[in-house]
Image (cartoon, rainbow, N blue to C red):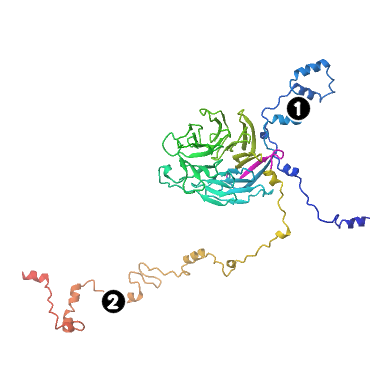
Amino acid sequence: MEDDEGMRGFFPASFGKKSKSQTPVESIHKATRRPPEPSDSHRQNPKPSTPDDDDDDDTLIGPPRPPPPPAAEVDDDDTLIGPPRPSAASDSDGDEPHRIPLSNEIVLKGHTKVVSALAIDHSGSRLLSGSYDYTVRMYDFQGMNARLESFRQVEPSEGHQVRSISWSPSADRFLCVTGSAQAKIYDRDGLTLGEFIKGDMYIRDLKNTKGHITGLTCGEWHPKTKETILTSSEDGSLRIWDVNDFTSQKQVIKPKLARPGRVPVTTCAWDPQGNSLAGAIGDGSIQIWSIKPGWGSRPDIYLPNAHSDEISGLKFSSDGRILLSRSFDASLKVWDLRQMKTSLKSFEELPNHYAQTNVAFSPDEQLILTGTSVERDSTTGGLLCFFDRQKLEVVSKVGISPTCSVVQCAWHPKLNQIFATAGDKHQGGTHILYDPTLSTRGALVCVARAPRKKSIDDFQAEPVIHNPHALPLFRDQPSRKRQREKILKDPLKSHKPEAPMNGPGFGGRVGVTKGSLLTQYLLKQGGMIKETWMDEDPREAILKYADVAEKDPKFIAPAYADTQPKPVFAKSDSEDEEDK
């Protein structure tokens, strides 16, 4: 029997096609569950303990408590006012009026620097993230598996940071704003459709330029009209463009300034209906323009000194009554558009070190959320803070990353998932917070989709590349610079000529004083060479041959003897003086 059992182990237990083993969804979501942290708690006001709770705790020690008399029951009923206390399961729901999907988290990685721009289309199927590494990554939740990789990477402008991304109302195109002066329009698949023109930087009046002349700071698509976009720039202007005409803008808006000059516009925003737009100026002011016939650069609402530092984000509420502003002065302010003299609430101690840090609403607009930056001497990392719009108080502070700052955030209404971008100088990613019981699609789809296993058909033999220049015949000769320098220093190998000797010669060599050559030295010593030309008069040396040339002409003189006149030479001055 033992031998039969041993042989049975070599045979398959069943025949036919085996069903693939699937990982249960519960275990997948368990792997992505966030660790419990004190900062993740929503409960700011814990429920106070009641006398009944103390009594319940006392019953755990000692014998059971005897039943109370009927009179005592009447007294207890009098003290308990309202419906009976709910069970423990309903206690947790009662303490959480805002159901924030925070139980699970995934991270979309790929960027090498902080992620400064974020955009999710209206259906929640595609996500765009832009970074300081000059690239835009495109993610598709329907086609992405558990590896969470982007399907396309685009570099809009070489060497310029990505500062803002915005989808069109129909989600067929998106706007990309970088640090350059020209915004770009891409289609849904990441193909370039056009680039807006750059203005003439030598024209002083910005209304006469066809486009921005310096780097852009923000841009947003019109919420209703799919042909209109809004951009702001460091040149101190806001411009409205028509996406069908890349050669010129539709309108130029010059903000109101306390002093003449050029102050950058740090950010801009449309209201949800597209009836007005807001711009944040570098001097800390907020200006709002209403879109109406004959409107111009004069703002309808002008709020000077809204913040003590530059403003990084603006957000309108859907009812058009509330405006949120986020600034570098570590504050988030809530404004009532009907009374803009003072803010309704200012939340402090929210550090911000990035010009793209935004502020957003929850889908029901009962919560306000924004991110914080990491400070150098602080022990807390990047946080995602939630505030109650009605009570104007802090609801929760969620830790996103211990070392990276949180810049952009969004709460998608259809997916019911929270997106937060984070990063620093060396890394960047997009954190997606969700709850399997509250959220739909989005991260749930791609996390549950396992990556495709490689089959034998996917095997590809690595090609052998023959590089002819790698052979010794074609290889470049090694550098012989040091060897040449060594040879030049050796007088024998370099055949260096001998320098002439100064003074009298020695060792078989003749000095310079007696002549540089041996033959010259011998002739001078033997008297064969006499140098008398320095002692003679050149005129007399020539005239001593005059009688010989006249008596015995040899070359030119006989040919002209008959035709040439007789030369008459001038007498010496000394003879004339003697005659006188």
Can you tell which quarter of the image residue 97 is in?
top right
Drawn side of residue 301 relative to residue 443, left or right:
left
Dot 1: element:
loop
Q: Is residue 13 above or below residue 548?
A: above
What residue did someone put label 1 on?
Answer: 86
From the image, state whether disc 2 or disc 1 is nearer to you. 1
Confirm or deny contact between disc 2 and disc 1 (CB under 8 A): no
Along the line of sight, the residue nearer the viewer: 474 or 363: 363
**Can residue 331 be seen in the rendering of this structure?**
no
Residue at (74, 20) in percent of width and height: 81
Residue 116 position within the rendered picture, expressed as x and y whole percent measured from the top left: 57, 43
Can you tell which quarter of the image residue 388 is in?
top right
Dot 2: element:
loop
The residue type indicated by label 1 comes to: Pro
Q: Residues within 10 Å of mark 2 (few under 14, many from 20)?
A: few
What's drawn in magenta, residue-wise? 425-440
The residue type indicated by label 2 comes to: Ile
Q: Is residue 113 above or below residue 71?
A: below
Closer to the N terminus: mark 2 or mark 1? 1
Extreme-top residue of the structure:
71
Residue 68 inside the magenta-drawn segment:
no
Drawn side of residue 488 relative to residue 571, left or right:
right
Q: Residues within 10 Å of mark 1 (few under 14, many from 20)?
A: few
In the picture, which quadrant includes the C terminus? bottom left
Residue 157 position within the rendered picture, expressed as x and y whole percent measured from the top left: 52, 50
Q: Is residue 525 above or below residue 410?
A: below
In the picture, which quadrant includes the N terminus? bottom right
Residue 426 inside the magenta-drawn segment:
yes
Gap between marks 2 and 1 measured at Cα: 138 Å
What residue did someone put label 2 on?
Answer: 529
**Can residue 457 be seen in the rendering of this structure?**
yes
